[in-house]
Image: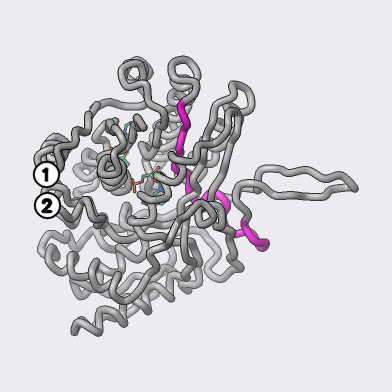
Amino acid sequence: MKIIVAGGDGFCGWPTALYLSQKGHDISIVDSMVRRHIDEELGSNSLTPIATLEERVAKWKELTGKEIRTYEGDLQDFDFLKMVLEKEQPEAFVHYAEQRSAPYSMIDREHAIYTQVNNVVGTLNVLYGIKDIVPNCHLIKLGTMGEYGTPNIPIEEGYLDIEHKGRKDRLPFPKQPGSYYHLSKVHDSHNIMFACRVWGIRATDLNQGVVYGLSTNETSLDPILANRLDYDSVFGTALNRFIIQAAIGHDLTVYGKGGQTRGFLNIEDTVRCIEIAAENPADVGEFRVFNQFTEEFSVTELAQMVKEAAAKVGLSVNIAHLENPRVEKEEHFYEATNTSLLDLGLKPHLLTEDVIGSILKTAVDHKDRVIKENVLPTVTWK
Ligand code: NAD
């Protein structure tokens, strides 16, 4: 298949582009490089050294003979996007290209507005681009489990069958997101659903859990192909962040009571889920929603698992409960459905001590690159 991976220079996008290319798909990457600029803005870095996108795709071609075309530009620029779609004529458009940090979106008014404009306008342009240029192209959009929040009932995959005053309907599952970033994803979901209904676009919204790990078979082929690994308090996600804290002997920073429970998945499953979605497209006019995670953990459970895995390799770490910079429930009911991708053939890579151990090894190898001041949270919700 001809597939565009937008955001293909990022943490999820780069391994996805390589995996799909390895599987024989014809891949092109679109990315504005804004994430690399945000590193400069925050005085931060990837724990792993990352080559430029040009170096990455050149190395991939040298090792495998497979070409990945690249387009540097912003999805907010419709003329640029139109040019790419006209040239590539994609059958699937994988859309990772958004500002994805909740704390970044909560820094101040400017960062909230940047996040929502970047994400909502970029996605609207993709919808118009598909409608006008490649109407049969399947949009595979990365949403997040964070769109649902933490309701006191089980979370379904996108829709809820309800009975109200004697009448029944299947309605979008209520969304109670916890940051301006997560709200941008909810706005995207509504815009995509509308475009499916009105223009007959085919779309899959993948409500992804928190992704951990960094390597796949393809990124491990050469250091030039290495994936980025965020550890700072703004872009580092739970688990990856704890593992890096363990590597540098820092306390594991649990926010508040640590009962916050979320869905998680290994980066190796992220890339497979995209393949499954691409090979089983949504129908014309269908807005399909899959919950893309494999296991649920509380923040305290994760910290405990990292502490134990670190002890096995002789690293002694403490778990510290910091005042929670976010406004969120710290103890709550959490149960979410995730059967659609499993039914389509996903075989999960579960979180084991070995998995934590291998990420920890990479973290230890690069621990001299850690900028220690960036580990503690600085952004507050209030
Ligand atoms: P990332 O920041 O590493 O990658 C995003 C990429 O998109 C970057 O390379 C950035 O330069 C690019 N980009 C951003 N805005 C753009 C624009 N307007 N035009 C072109 N390129 C643009 O993020 P990630 O962790 O790879 O996440 C990818 C997607 O997956 C995001 O949409 C995110 O919401 C979703 N997601 C990620 C996680 C996670 O744990 N990482 C969890 C749930 C959902």
Residue 10 at least partly seen: no
Residue 231 on image: x %, y %: 26, 59
Q: Determine which of the numbered discs, if any, sits on residue 349 in the image.
A: none
Considering the numbered disc 2 on the image, is that residue within a helix, a strand or a loop? loop
Taking the spot 18% from the left edge, 55% from the top edge, the residue there is 220
In the picture provided, is 292 more to the left or to the right than 38?
A: right
Question: Seen in the image, is 283 located left or right of residue 124?
Answer: right
Residue, far front: 24
Q: Is residue 350 above or below residue 27?
A: below
Position of residue 41 measured from the top left corner of the image (x, y, whole percent): 23, 42
Type of the residue with mark 1: Leu
Please rate how many residues cluster around mark 1, counting C-alpha atoms within 10 Å: few if below 14, some from 14 to 19, many from 20.
few
* Horizontal and vertical percent position of residue 359: 24, 66
> Which one is nearer the viewer's eye here, 326 or 273?
273
Mark before the other along the chain sequence, 2 or 1: 1
Q: Which residue in the protein does label 1 denote?
A: 63
Q: Which residues are magenta?
A: 137-155
SS at mark 1 in the image: helix
Is residue 300 positioned above or below 334 on the image?
A: below
Q: Which amino acid type is marked by label 2?
A: Asp
Q: Nearer the viewer, residue 367 or 212?
A: 212
**Residue at numbered disc 2:** 222
The quadrant where residue 191 appears: top right
Do the residues under discs 2 and 1 have CB atoms within 8 angstroms?
yes
**Residue drawn where x is 27% and y is 69% of the image:** 243
Disc 2 packing (10 Å; few <14; some 14–19; many ≥20): few
Most foreground residue, 63 or 99: 63
Per the model, the C-alpha gap separating discs 2 and 1 is: 9 Å
Q: Nearer the viewer, mark 2 or mark 1?
A: 1
